[in-house]
Amino acid sequence: KYNYTTAIYIERNLVFFGTKFGGVQIYDLDKKTKQTFAADMGNFPTNHITSIIKLSDNEILIGSNGYLTIYNTTNRQFYSIDKKYPSLHSFCITKKRISALLLDSQERLWIGTNYGIISYDIAQDKIIHFDKNLLPSNKITCFYENYKNKLFIGTENGVVFYDHKTDSFHEIKISDTKLAGLNKHIYDITEDNLGNIWIGSNLGLIKCNPGTLECTFFTTKDGLATNEIYS
């Protein structure tokens, strides 16, 4: 059960593996050593790790069920987010499960939960909560910021993008009539060398033009081995 990997992050010589039941494993590529950190060791409140990202030059942010934990790569110590951002900690623990994390180009921390999105402006210590009034679903699955600083957000029922310049959300309409009325669970979002956005879902693979937001849908009928595209 400890091999159920939920998140991977590489920072210089350190490789972080988040797991569903076994906490975090850190591999040092230089020393060729492995360390395991878990709730029963007092490192964080729960062993279900959902996301791992870089927070600063020497800090890694780890998301789990209702908690955020910081790992300092210099002193190799863990500490709760409330030590650095107490207001964010108080807000997050009321929003239950944390499912995705992103620190964007504007130094805003985006936290996906099962109750929508928490946006935290680090410089201003300002928290904004976005829910299904602006999103297709409150259950957030992933974030991706492209090279033009447009933030794409995956949910359990479709995908939207957030434009920093206009401070607005825009739902990406997938017009394939065969998909009408079906929940489009988004698993992952990435970008290719030409700037196209690729979206993995439970119904197939979506290619999106970030300028026009026009989408092309690919399924097993187009040669995919399965319509469940996780990454």
Image (cartoon, rainbow, N blue to C red):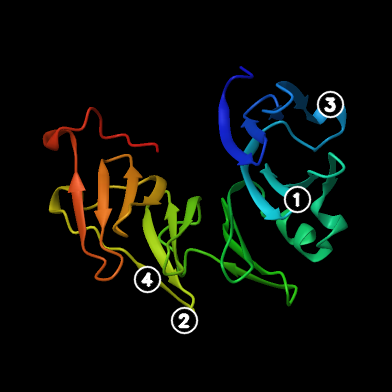
SS at mark 4 in the image = strand
Picture disc at residue 170: 4
The picture quadrant where one finds residue 117 is bottom right
Measured in 3D between alpha carbons, the distance from the residue under mark 3 to the one under mark 4, in whole angstroms, is 43 Å
Give the residue type at disc 3.
Answer: Asp
Measured from the top left, where is residue 13 in percent x and y? 67, 36
Q: Tell me the crowding category of disc 4: few under 14, some 14 to 19, or many 20 or more residues within 10 angstroms, Cα based.
A: some
Foreground disc of the pair 3, 1: 1
Q: Tell me the crowding category of disc 3: few under 14, some 14 to 19, or many 20 or more residues within 10 angstroms, Cα based.
A: few
Foreground disc of the pair 2, 1: 1
SS at mark 3 in the image = helix
Q: Which residue is at a point 81% across and 62% down the rendered structure image? A: 85
SS at mark 2 in the image = loop
Measured from the top left, where is residue 62 in percent x and y? 69, 44
Question: First in sequence: mark 4 or mark 2?
Answer: 2
Query: Which image quadrant: the N terminus?
Result: top right
Front one among 86 and 189 = 189
Name the residue that disc number 3 marks.
40
Give the residue type at disc 2.
Answer: Lys
Question: First in sequence: mark 3 or mark 4?
Answer: 3
Picture disc at residue 59: 1
Give the residue type at disc 4.
Answer: His
Give the residue type at disc 1.
Answer: Glu
Picture disc at residue 165: 2
Query: Which image quadrant: the C terminus?
Result: top left
Q: Tell me the crowding category of disc 2: few under 14, some 14 to 19, or many 20 or more residues within 10 angstroms, Cα based.
A: few
Question: First in sequence: mark 3 or mark 1?
Answer: 3
SS at mark 1 in the image = strand
